[in-house]
Amino acid sequence: MSVPRARSDQSGGHKPNFLVIVADDMGFSDPGCYGGEVHTPNLDRLARNGLRFTQAYSTARCWPSRTCLLTGYYAQQVRMDPPLGRIPAWARIMPHYLKPAGYRCCHSGKWHLMGAPKVVADGGFDRSYVIHDHDRFFHPQKHELNDQPLPSVQPNTGFYLTTHIADRAIGFLDEHQANTPHQPFCLYLAFTSPHFPLHALPEDIARYKDVYLQGWDRIRERRWQRMRKMGLINCPLPPADPDIIPSWNLSKEDLENMIGPGEAPRAVPWDSLTEEQKRFQATKMAIHAAMVHRMDIEIGRVLARLDAMGVMDDTVILFVSDNGASAEQIIRGDMHDRAAQPGSAGSYLCLGPGWSTASNTPFRLHKSWVHEGGIASPLIVHWPAGISARNELRHTPCHFVDVLPTLMELAGAPFEPYWNGRTAPPLPGVSLVPALSRDVAVQRDPLYFHHIGNRALRMGDWKLVAAEGDPWELYDLRADRSEMRNLAARHPERVADMEARWKAFDEVFRSQAGPVPQ
């Protein structure tokens, strides 16, 4: 069937609602519908009654990914990677495109668009709950409602951030239903789970208590096998990269002194760990799984509210993760109490490279790298009224910069180049509407990546990629998305051509951002 196209006028033309859900640091294979053993029945239901994209990409890090989702531009185009002050005057944010088309726009959760610090005043949202504290799930210290500071949450009050983000979203939906039911809505639901620190509810951790004692090697193998059967991938399972970790991680000695002998700073073979390390590492992954599990529960509550409102079928729901799972091992916030129960407010644990390797199965590397493990994201699209397909895969490569053009087409919101008296560059993304009805390749420019010196370009099935300070690598992703066979030496002309194209994109995008205001 053809996908309905919303009319661009405001005279009563039908427009779907939008729910954009973002997970934080969740690996490609964590949810059940992408091969994981984590219990995610609500995400699985969306996938079963909708579409799963197999080659969707983030930018490898929290704030540049959210910049792409919210502005429709690569982060480099709007001074957000690296963050260099306010976004350009010509740059708009999601509500600035959708509200002229009649939408009421609400936000709940993480923001992290540093160049537009106020969600309502700068971002144009009608309602917003924003969490600025990314180090505490049980008693956050900095959060705001409609740009106004809220009191810090006190310890031991029963507060859990993932649940609260959903509570606020449901409250915004209730307000919309009571006051503006004639308008379509856009809800941007941005969770902080399962970003570090590993904080989860005891009852959720208990569900996964012994699941991960089998170790990250076996978990990777089993996920890979399930993903192949699902048709999500067709590539080999690469060996782990035990020598590659973020340069800012704590040292082995510091980790042992501050956390204990159960910590493991490298993705080494599971059987090489001590029994104490195996138990401690299995507990950490159980907490990570519990965080994903709880996020799914809270997503289910939001979906139930859509059902109760009678709008579930005509709400376009998109689910993504802002980057791959994290190999980071740092301690912030209230620091780490070695006597505290793992997963509790007094603990500060990170997933680490062993389990992030498993979460990113079958891809190499982690959050912040632009190899596939850092940038591959699940993308679930659910819209029963507009998509006849059920439980189908879409294989076209796509990027977070494509989300806003897709919403704009469905909303009938054309791109107008003038904003704040300035002329904006064209949006770099493309609408994915053609891929909603059938599995077609969406025609587009090459996909560009650049983060902290890590860089890549994808042209068709070819990917040029390099870690900071390393030479270019070249991969044919048709059968090697696990990036095991570097073909750079065999195709020097292709490398040179793609490098030139990457440099041209990088130069143009940074020039579009303009000088940093003083």
Image: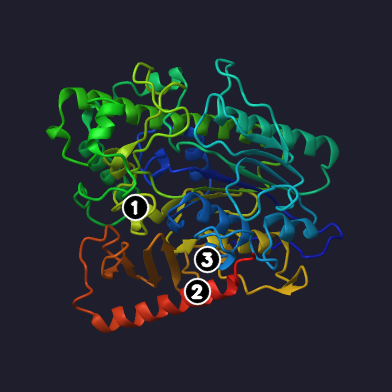
Circle 3 — which element?
helix
Q: Earlier in the sequence, mark 1 or mark 3?
A: 3
Residue 303 place in picture, x, y as percent: 62, 36
Q: Nearer the viewer, residue 117 or 358?
A: 117
Q: Earlier in the sequence, mark 2 or mark 1?
A: 1
Instruction: Give the residue drawn at x 34%, y 69%.
Output: 463
Q: Nearer the viewer, residue 221 or 261?
A: 261
- Cβ atoms under marks 2 and 3 closer than 8 Å: no
| Mark 2, residue position | 443
Q: Is residue 156 left or right of residue 60?
A: right
For the residues marked 2 and 3, what is the alpha-carbon distance in whole angstroms?
22 Å
Task: Please determine whether, in this image, residue 375 is positioned above or below residue 502.
Answer: above
Instruction: Give the residue drawn at x 27%, y 84%.
Output: 493
The circle on residue 76 is 3
Instruction: Give the residue drawn at x 20%, y 46%.
Output: 242
Residue type at numbered disc 1: Gly
Asked whether the viewer can see residue 309, the reply is: no
Residue type at numbered disc 2: Gln
| Mark 1, residue position | 373
For the residues marked 1 and 3, what is the alpha-carbon distance in whole angstroms?
21 Å
- Quadrant of the snapshot with the C terminus: bottom right
